[in-house]
Structure formats: structure tokens, C-alpha cells
Image (cartoon, rainbow, N blue to C red):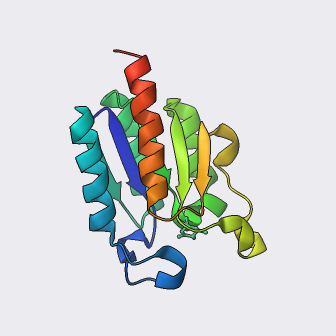
Amino acid sequence: PRILVLHGPNLNLLGTREPAVYGHQTLADVNAALVARAQQAGVEIATFQSNHEGQLIDRIHAAREQRVEFVVINPGAFTHTSVALRDAFAGTAIPFVEVHLSNVHRREPFRHHSFFSDIAEGVIVGLGSKGYLYALEFALDRIAATPR
Ligand code: DQA
């Protein structure tokens, strides 16, 4: 794939998990919308969710081998905890957009810091599942501007 979408811990519960905060769309709904948009643009996309930090790191390493050009990631709670996942991006130099469904800045203070934002191309917070599609739009523009 040229674009990889990564979902971190607990995002498999989307749709049933605190719907007032995260919305009613399931992860399958979100992924289906992303795949449909990428297909329309003729760009190969893959999606991956894991509750395990190491699996997400391994997937980022594999993405470099696969010459993935852009990642869209919602690191979930690893956003606020994972130096290791951050280092996977620093180490592979794959550009990425960080997405959060909720507006983390109007939630608990422990959600205000991200280990990813300062090395991300950009950050989308608080726009619900549409945020992934906006991030994908940016990735598609980037890819269109840099033929491989
Ligand atoms: C989240 C925000 C995080 O603080 C939280 O731990 C999540 C989801 C979001 O999409 O709003 O799991 O990344």
C-alpha cells in the first residue's frame, strides 16, 4: 500500500465505546469510508488496528519495507505514553498525520500532551471520524504531488 492507516488501543471498540465522546461509527465503518475514498483516487491503502504497542511498532517497520509513503494514525492512549511508537516514526522517517476523534484539549490534562505532534506533518483533533478522511485527503494530495 502507498497509504497505511493505523488505529491504536481500544479503537476496535469504536461505535460502542463512550459514543458521546467517540461517536456511533464503528471501526469497520471508518475503514470502509477510507478504503472507498482511496480506491476512488486509485491509491492503494491498508488499515491496521492493534491494542499492542509492539505490534504497531512492527507494522510501522514493515511499512518502511513496503515503501508506504504516508501514514494516518490515531495512536489512542499511546499518544500520551509511548516514546517507543514515536521513535518508530522517527526511525523510519515515514511522514504521518495524527488524528484524534475527540478534542483532546478540552478533556483531562493527561490527554493534552502528545509524543507525536511535534514530529507529525499535522494533527487533526475533535472532528470525529471525519478527521480520518481529512487526513487521508492530505495524504492523497501529498502523494499526487510526489510521483514515485
Ligand atoms: C483518542 C484520544 C485519546 O486520549 C484516547 O486515549 C483514545 C482516543 C481519540 O481519538 O480521541 O483512545 O485518541
Q: Is residue 65 left or right of residue 91?
A: left
Q: How many marks?
A: 0
Q: Is residue 68 visible?
A: yes
The quadrant where residue 25 appears: bottom left
Q: Is residue 124 left or right of residue 58?
A: right
Q: Is residue 8 left or right of residue 113?
A: left
**Residue closer to the observer: 91 or 130:** 130
Q: Residue at x 55, y 78 (%)?
A: 21
Tell me: residue 99, above or below residue 139. below
Measuring from the top left, give residue 118's x and y in whole percent: 70, 42
The outermost residue toward the right is: 109
Q: Quadrant of the N terminus?
A: top left
Q: Is residue 74 left or right of residue 136?
A: right
Q: Residue at x 58, y 68 (%)?
A: 102
**Residue closer to the observer: 16 or 59:** 16
Measuring from the top left, give residue 68's x and y in whole percent: 35, 31
Measuring from the top left, give residue 79's x and y in whole percent: 60, 59
Q: Quadrant of the C terminus?
A: top left
**Residue closer to the observer: 87 or 116:** 116
Measuring from the top left, give residue 34's x and y in whole percent: 31, 51
Q: Residue at x 47, y 51 (%)?
A: 73
Q: Is residue 81 visible?
A: no
Q: Residue at x 46, y 27 (%)?
A: 142
Tell me: residue 33, above or below residue 26. above
Q: Quadrant of ligand 1?
A: bottom right
The quadrant where residue 41 appears: top left
